[in-house]
Image (cartoon, rainbow, N blue to C red):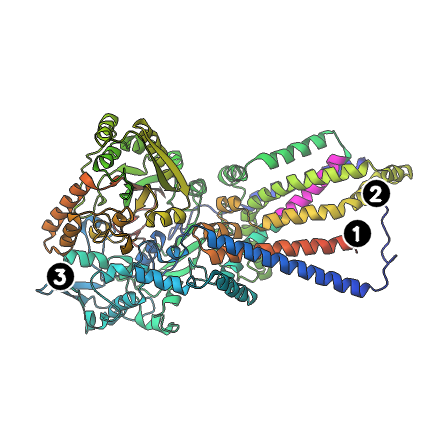
């Protein structure tokens, strides 16, 4: 039987030192994780059997042009020195220049990451808003038609290739019905209309008070976001269902019912209250997965996000861009982990 | 339980409501009459500096932004080069100096006049910066040290002196290339950083005199061009041109059918078939310069036997591929100059002939052979490799296909590490030398020469007297004689080179039928937007 501890009770004597220790632990974990990530990606970048110089100078460059670029990239230096230079630059917020378009990678990421952030956030929202209640309903009405529908929805979400769903979605909702905008973030008439503050068009157009652009951007994002939302919905609803089933079979639920509490209170306050913590992990993971950028969705919807950015960079051996993108994605993962840890403590006093 | 039902009803209501409100978000269809919207893959653009750009999508932008001394008329490419920013030119008696007289009254987008001094600056700059395409100019003997004497402005004229006599057509053809773009000296030098001659600034900005100026370039997202109302050939009808990066063929097709774009440039054969005959949409086919070939590494003990080379050329199902998975995309072509180039020939001596190939292999004493093909992961190339695998197997040759990314495969090819390479080659500038100088020219075949830029060297092939013949064709002043020389070189190449040229590219474009006069540049140049009307 699970009993929720009351906050404030049973606090240890020196909370400050515990707090300090845990903070240091968290920071230490982040640093070690990030260093490991940098090291692994760097090594992978070096052992790839491709010649990064050719990607800049082209395969028809003269020997002089090639050599000049080789030296400019620091490739004549020992690998370990290159790694240290790299770490030093990263610490200064400098991811180097993209080998391909010669722009600072940090600037490119600033451009592509908000696009992914916008899409992933909306997708996760859709996934949570529909997925969690669906999972709860399915668990409560186990074996009923709601459960069957939830199972079907999840199964389809799991097993359909996302590019296929995306294309069919585009064909139906954009091509035939014309309900939503086509691929891209906004229609061509609205490109660069609102000043870029956050890089997320929905947010920027709201800040600017420009409803026309907001509506247009919404019509473009709704389909890919629903698609990603559906994907995370499939996962979230399945997990919610199994968490809830576990709780519903517990004795305290029977006790609560016997006490005459309303079904609503039993389900949402007692049972759901106990799965919040587990759900947070599930949602955070699914959110992080979407923030990595979903390459196929981005390609089909011509969405200039970080997934297709890293993929393009990888295929053109643009290692600065790949490493920069990977570091950002890694950082997002670590931050989300820390954030969900914090939420744990908020929802579950035992974790304090 | 009642509450639960309410909740279910609530969710269903919310879903229905959100679906019902969607129609109000519907986007506009049909592009405005003075705007051209194009879907294309533009993630290959790395720079917009004409002295540095060397990719297709970059050339497409630069052709519309920068004028050149001489250029092609997009509506009459067959005519060859014609005056652009230069009004006329004369050639000195020794054939080494060409003097151009500038057209009067042409202005850059900035309002600065286009002068001979700008030309001097632009060409010298391209040589000094020594970026990838600089060889197009430096092959005439220009060096950063000698440009102050070899490229000289004098009043209204610009004088260009080459290190030896070259065919005038060769020099002028090269000046039509992207690197021949004339930049606004004053504006560029205002943005110089260090001594980069404005290179960093020009990567993302424009300083030209052409029909359009660059409004913005967002890598892998879009390029926006704005019409130059003072364009010396007259203001373009399309005031704004937007090229959007759309990777997927199916997505491009949907956009075209909905009318959100005017041109779709990367439709695959299935989508081309899908839109063919649809009302309001036209499919154009234009011959481009890209060739598909296979090459055999001559350092391989068996592949270097002439009979084996010949046998393999008979083991390729040219028409079979053309009529199946390459349908509409490629046409059979077996010589190294693309159709429409000076000296191009249409001889097709080879076809799939299993008996003949078997006999040749027997004569060469080859009973069984296992070789590795390096193929980059592009669909058409993999399919070609699979077709070869099938036809080779019929003659007892086992072809192992190694698929890699473009860079991986290329790195091994350049290191002479592949037995067989399934390759594509696009000409760099519209002169026959561009292909002759790489397929049929290899003065030093030794491993130490490291002439990785030459296709002949990559395959460890010594072209023998073809090297000298190619050198001779470059300096031949008489256009007709020069043409004949290339024809001979190609026939000899066809007979004994370890290259089987197979196909020439056809670019199929989906176009809204109301868009007129769009020319993609054929085999020799890039797209032109200024003649386009709707």
Q: Mark 3 points at which residue?
A: B165
The disc, 2 or 1, on the residue closer to the chain's N-terminal end is: 2
Which chain letter goes with mark 1?
Answer: A
C-alpha distance separating marks 3 and 1: 85 Å
Q: Horizontal placement of B491 versus B499: left or right?
A: left
Q: Position of residue B295 (x, y in %)?
A: 28, 42
Q: Name the residue under label 2.
A: A265
Secondary structure category for the residue under label 1 = loop
Q: Residues within 10 Å of mark 3 (few under 14, many from 20)?
A: some
- Image marks 2 and 3: residues in contact by CB distance under 8 Å: no
Q: Mark 1 points at which residue?
A: A348
- Is A101 in front, or is A321? A321
Give the magenta part as a residue range.
A123-139
Secondary structure category for the residue under label 2 = helix
Q: Which of marks 2 and 1 is in front?
A: 1
Q: Main secondary structure of the magenta part?
A: helix
Q: Horizontal placement of B16 versus B398: left or right?
A: right
* Up-down relation of residue A255 to residue A64 (above or below): above
Q: Does the magenta stretch include residue A135?
A: yes
Q: Horizontal placement of B477 versus B61: left or right?
A: left
Q: How crowded is mark 1: few (under 14 residues within 10 Å), some or many (20 or more)?
A: some
Which chain letter goes with mark 2?
Answer: A
């Amino acid at each position: 039987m699970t009993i929720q501890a009351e906050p404030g009770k049973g606090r240890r004597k020196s909370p400050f030192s515990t707090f300090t220790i845990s903070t240091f632990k968290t920071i230490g974990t982040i640093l070690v994780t990030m260093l490991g990530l940098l090291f692994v990606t760097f090594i992978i970048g070096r052992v790839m059997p491709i010649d990064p110089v050719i990607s800049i100078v082209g395969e028809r460059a003269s020997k002089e042009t090639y050599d000049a670029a080789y030296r400019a990239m620091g490739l004549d230096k020992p690998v370990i020195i290159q790694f240290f230079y790299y770490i030093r630059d990263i610490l200064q917020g400098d991811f180097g220049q993209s080998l391909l378009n010669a722009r600072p990678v940090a600037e490119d990421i600033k451009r592509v990451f908000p696009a992914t952030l916008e899409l992933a956030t909306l997708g996760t929202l859709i996934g949570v808003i529909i997925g969690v209640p669906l999972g709860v309903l399915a668990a409560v009405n186990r074996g009923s038609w709601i459960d069957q529908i939830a199972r079907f929805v999840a199964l389809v979400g799991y097993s359909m290739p996302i590019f296929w769903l995306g294309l069919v979605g585009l064909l139906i909702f954009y091509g035939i019905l014309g309900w939503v905008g086509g691929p891209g973030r906004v229609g061509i008439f609205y490109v660069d209309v609102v000043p870029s503050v956050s890089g997320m068009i929905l947010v920027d157009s709201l800040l600017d008070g420009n409803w026309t652009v907001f509506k247009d951007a919404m019509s473009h994002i709704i389909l890919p976001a629903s698609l990603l939302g559906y994907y995370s919905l499939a996962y979230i609803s399945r997990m919610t269902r199994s968490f809830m089933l576990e709780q519903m079979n517990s004795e305290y639920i029977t006790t609560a019912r016997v006490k005459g509490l309303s079904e609503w209170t039993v389900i949402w306050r007692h049972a759901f209250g106990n799965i919040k913590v587990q759900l947070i992990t599930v949602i955070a993971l699914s959110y992080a997965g979407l923030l990595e950028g979903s390459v196929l969705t981005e390609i089909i919807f011509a969405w200039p996000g970080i997934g297709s950015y890293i993929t393009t960079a990888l295929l053109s051996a643009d290692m600065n861009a790949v490493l920069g993108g990977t570091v950002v994605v890694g950082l997002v993962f670590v931050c989300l982990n820390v954030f969900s840890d914090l939420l744990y403590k908020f929802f579950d006093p035992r974790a304090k | 339980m009642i509450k639960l039902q309410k909740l279910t009803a609530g969710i269903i209501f919310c879903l229905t409501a959100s679906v019902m409100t969607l129609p109000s978000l519907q986007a506009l269809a049909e592009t405005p009459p003075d705007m051209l919207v194009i879907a294309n893959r533009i993630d290959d653009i790395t720079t917009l500096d004409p002295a540095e750009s060397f990719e297709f999508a970059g050339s497409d932008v630069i052709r519309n932004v920068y004028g050149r001394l001489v250029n092609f008329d997009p509506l009459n490419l067959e005519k060859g080069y014609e005056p652009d920013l230069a009004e006329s030119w004369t050639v000195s008696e020794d054939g080494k100096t060409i003097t151009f007289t500038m057209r009067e009254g042409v202005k850059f987008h900035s309002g600065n006049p286009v002068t001979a001094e700008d030309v001097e600056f632009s060409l010298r700059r391209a040589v000094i910066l020594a970026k990838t395409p600089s060889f197009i100019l430096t092959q005439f003997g220009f060096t950063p040290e000698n440009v102050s004497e070899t490229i000289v402005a004098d009043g209204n004229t610009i004088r260009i002196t080459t290190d030896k006599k070259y065919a005038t057509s060769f020099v002028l053809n090269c000046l039509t290339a992207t690197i021949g773009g004339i930049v606004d000296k004053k504006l560029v030098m205002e943005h110089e950083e260090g001594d980069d001659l404005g290179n960093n600034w020009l990567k993302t900005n424009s300083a030209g005199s052409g029909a359009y100026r660059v409004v913005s370039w967002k890598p892998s997202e879009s390029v926006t061009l704005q019409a130059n109302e003072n364009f010396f050939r007259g203001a373009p009808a399309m005031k704004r041109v937007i090229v959007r990066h759309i990777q997927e063929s199916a997505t491009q097709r949907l956009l075209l059918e909905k009318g959100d774009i005017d041109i779709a440039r990367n439709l695959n054969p299935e989508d081309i078939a899908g839109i063919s005959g649809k009302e309001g949409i036209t499919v154009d086919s234009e011959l481009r310069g890209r060739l598909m070939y296979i090459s055999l590494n001559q350092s391989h003990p068996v592949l270097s036997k002439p009979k084996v080379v010949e046998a393999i050329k008979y083991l390729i199902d040219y028409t079979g591929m053309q009529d199946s998975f390459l349908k509409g995309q490629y046409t059979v072509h077996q010589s190294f100059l693309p159709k429409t180039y000076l000296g191009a020939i249409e001889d097709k001596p080879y076809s799939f002939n299993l008996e003949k190939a078997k006999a040749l292999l027997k004569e060469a004493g080859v009973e069984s052979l296992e070789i590795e093909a390096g193929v980059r992961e592009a669909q058409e190339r993999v399919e070609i490799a699979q077709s070869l695998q099938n036809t080779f197997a019929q003659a007892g040759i086992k072809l192992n296909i190694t698929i890699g990314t473009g860079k991986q495969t290329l790195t091994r090819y350049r290191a002479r590490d592949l037995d067989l390479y399934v390759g594509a080659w696009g000409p760099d500038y519209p002169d026959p030398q561009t292909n002759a100088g790489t397929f049929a020219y290899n003065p030093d075949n030794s491993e130490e020469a490291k002439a990785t830029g030459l296709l002949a060297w990559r395959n460890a092939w010594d072209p023998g007297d073809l090297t000298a013949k190619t050198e001779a064709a470059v300096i031949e002043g008489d256009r007709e004689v020069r043409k004949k020389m290339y024809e001979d070189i190609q026939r000899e190449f066809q007979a004994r080179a370890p290259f089987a040229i197979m196909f020439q590219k056809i670019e199929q474009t989906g176009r809204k039928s109301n868009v007129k006069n769009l020319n993609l540049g054929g085999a020799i140049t890039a797209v032109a937007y200024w003649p386009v009307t709707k």
